[in-house]
Image (tube, coloured by chain):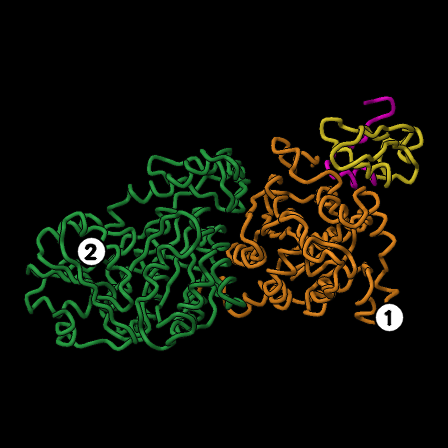
Amino acid sequence: MHPVIDESLCKRCMICVWVCPKGVFEGEFLSLLGSPLPEVARPSDCINWGRSDTPCELCMLSCPEHAIEYVPEGGS
Amino acid sequence: MRRMMTGNQAVVEAAVRAGCRFFSGYPITPVSDLMEYMARRLAQVGGVFIQMEDELGAITAAIGASWAGKKSMTATSGPGFSLMQEGIGYAAMTETPVVVVDSQRGGPSTGQPTMPSQGDVLQARYGSHGDYPIAVLAPSDIQEVYDLTIKAFNIAEALRTPVVLLMDAFMSHMAEPVSEGEYEILERKVHPPGPVERPYEPGEDLVPPFPVFGRGNLVSVTGLTHDEKGVPRPEDNRVHATLIRRLFGKFERRKDLLEDVRTMGDGRRLVIAYGMMGRLAEALVDRGYRLLRPRVLWPAPTGPLKREMAEADVVYVVEMNIGKYSLVVKRVAEELGIEVHSISILGGRIPTPSELEAMME
Amino acid sequence: MSFWDFFRRERWPHIFCPGCGIGMVLNALWKAFEETEQEPEKWAFVSGIGCTARAPAYMRVDSLHTLHGRAIAFATGLKLGNPELNVMVFSGDGDIASIGGNHLIHAARRNMDLKVIMINNGIYGMTGGQLSPTTLPGLRTTTTPMGNYDYTMGTAELVAHLGANFSARWTTAHIVMVKEAIKRMIPKEGFCFLEVVSQCPTNFGRRNRMEDPRKMLQFMKEHSVHVSRVGQLGAYFEEPVFVVGTFADRDRKGYVARLREAGYFESF
């Protein structure tokens, strides 16, 4: 499993980038008025990669918009 | 069978009779013994009583219990009534049935804790901010305290509204025989269990069915301006105007419940008095006066006021305050071109009928 | 139960600013409910006024959005009106600790059967960033433009002292601990209180060189000290420190049980 970001919900706060212990996300915070969408840059680094369960849910729990979900490898 | 009761006891007995099963209060003269009596009485009938930490908590806990489907009430006097105003406005906005007893004492501030007054008659109507309707009842004897307490619950449940019962420090503690006859008890319309999409969609009477919490109605209730779904819409002028006009509209449709006056005598001199002063003024009927005694003060009984004033040459409004209700009477009298005299009694001493008559001359 | 079984998708996106911690707590709340298999229909949520107080309207539950400060008093009436209902108060620090402080104190003293989640962002976010009784010393708010000279309130410690069955404080930088604390509260009777220190980038961070929400989270993480490492109450009165952990976990009888013993709820 690995995280995907729902673009329509994301408010570009970059908390996912901060919280992930594996550096799966990449993104740049410009200001509260608007930043580019963060991306799931290294999905295969995710702790949940290659598993059918999600022992680490830090990014999902930490996304204030609930814009992050886990999908099977290769999904989107 | 007639039983001797004080006013405070009559409120409790009538409330229990009307189905009240929740009371939250805070001690204050002159309703502390109402609370004490209620604490025992509710235990006997499977109800719940809680002494809250203040009147802010007392009114809000009563509203909370109403959302659990309980008929609920609180009781207080001037200072506590002031603290309850925000909660009363919330009940009006969210259409929560709740009964508030205000046993009036001399004010402002701590004033005269043990003396009667009618100084809260405008506060009971207009005390909370914003535009809202409310029903205010004023009994003149202990039998009426009993009858109007039941009526207060009926109005609250039928219209989904806060209702104020205005007593005073003397009426709370005066004892008289009360007969507990047959009464019609009204219950609130409720939504059936299960999700409700539009909880604030009103029926023909403009009163939406009540979504009792815990039955899966899954409604969000808010004191913010809300649409029929219950969604907050504070910026929408039309949603706000529609909501507020509907709140007033549901009062206009229940004149059968809300227009309640007593008239006596047939002289050309009309006395308008309510509560304790209504009782006093009854003594003037034998002396040639016509009496109009509203039992529901608000909404103001405009129709009966006009009818009675049309038969009069002069009008006296007798009340234990600076002349508050006379403002309402004057507004109606202006249209008819009749002279209105405000007889203002301050200090809490009840005059004799002869003293009152002398004040009117 | 998926997230969107618990929250109303049709009312999303919520009103909270980018990077606000309230949404994080909503995740933890849902996850705690999911893991303990709660049925939302059996819960009622009560909130007061403020940013956090807007959250229950997004939940697919019965919810009461009430007056500023009175959430716990409303919830008390609701719980006693129907003791079978699980009642959770979800509101902010201004609402619960400041204007509603008296209701908090007395509900904790009574061990009233309520769960209370107080999101403490240390600021009045909705009204534009004024000082809160929970603002840490030295930090800037719109009403302390030179930096906060006022003392801070230890709400979770206070609740623990009053005899509540559960009291804990965590921050949104410890989101898994937040979830675990909620799970711990769910089956308990009596008064259960969880304070979640949270970030307000818009009205707090922006005035304290922490507009980037990540800086606020980092600040909370670095300034947190576990209660087991705190020698005495008030050791951090003068410093910007968050004492985190569980302050009380007891099994005293709740208020409903005591009311039943006194003879209420059942006719005789």
Chain coloured yellow here: A
Tell me if mark 2 has few (under 14), some (14-19) or many (20+) residues whose alpha carbon lies within 10 angstroms of its own: some
- Residue C129 shows which numbered tag? none
Chain coloured green here: B
- Residue C231 shows which numbered tag? 1
Gap in Å between the C-alphas at discs 2 and 1? 70 Å
**Residue B33 covered by magenta stretch:** no
Name chain C's colour. Answer: orange
Give the magenta-colored segment's residue range. Answer: A58-76
Question: What is the chain letter for disc 2?
Answer: B
Image coordinates of residue B222 in percent, x first then y, are 52, 45
Placement of the N terminus of chain A among the 4 image quadrants: top right
At horizontal 35% and vertical 47% (from top left) the residue drawn is: B158
Placement of the C terminus of chain A among the 4 image quadrants: top right
* Residue type, mark 1 in image: Gly
Judge left or right: residue B218 versus residue C23: left
Tell me if mark 1 has few (under 14), some (14-19) or many (20+) residues whose alpha carbon lies within 10 angstroms of its own: few
**Residue A63 covered by magenta stretch:** yes
Whether B327 is drawn above or below B77: the answer is above
At horizontal 51% and vertical 59% (from top left) the residue drawn is: B61
Q: Quadrant of residue B265?
A: bottom left
Is B73 in front, or is C252? B73
* Residue type, mark 2 in image: Val
Q: Secondary structure at mark 2?
A: strand
Is B88 in front, or is B346? B346
Q: Which residue is mark 2?
A: B261
Q: Secondary structure at mark 1?
A: loop
Judge left or right: residue B274 versus residue B101: left
Image coordinates of residue B322 in percent, x first then y, are 29, 66
